[in-house]
Amino acid sequence: MNFVHGTSSEKEKELQFGRQTNEEFYARKKRQLQHANDVSKKTCFKCQKVGYIGRKCP
């Protein structure tokens, strides 16, 4: 798969997105979810400390 970088137009990005395979799509989605679930960089909304989320706040 060729990735679209830099000054590519939106149309080029849409065309490239349409060319990717299901495996490539799911692999990218899995990486995004793993990054989103990394709690070590999140801030607790109750006490504003970094490293955990509200339901695990001491």
Image (cartoon, rainbow, N blue to C red):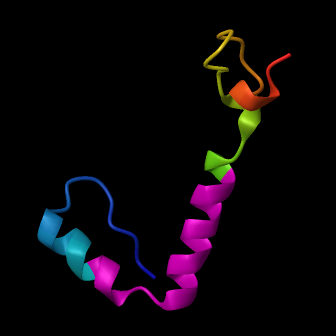
Residue 54 in sight from this viewpoint: yes
Q: Is residue 23 above or below residue 7?
A: below
**Does residue 27 show up magenta in the picture?**
yes
Residue 26 picture location, percent across and down: 57, 78
Q: Is residue 10 above or below residue 52?
A: below
Direction from residue 30 to residue 3 in the image, left or right? left
Residue sitting nearer the eye, 27 or 57 = 57
Residue 3 picture location, percent across and down: 40, 70
At x 86%, y 16%, the residue is: 58
Direction from residue 15 to residue 24 in the image, left or right? right
Q: Quadrant of residue 27?
A: bottom right
Residue 48 picture location, percent across and down: 64, 11
Q: How many marks?
A: 0
Residue 53 in sight from this viewpoint: no
**Does residue 25 show up magenta in the picture?**
yes
Magenta range: 16-34
Residue sitting nearer the eye, 51 or 27 = 51
Q: Is residue 34 above or below residue 52?
A: below
Q: Quadrant of residue 10?
A: bottom left
Residue 13 picture location, percent across and down: 24, 70
At x 20%, y 54%, the residue is: 7
At x 71%, y 12%, the residue is: 49
At x 41%, y 77%, the residue is: 2
Residue sitting nearer the eye, 25 or 48 = 48
Which residue is the extreme one toward the right? 58
Which secondary structure dominates the residues rendered in magenta? helix
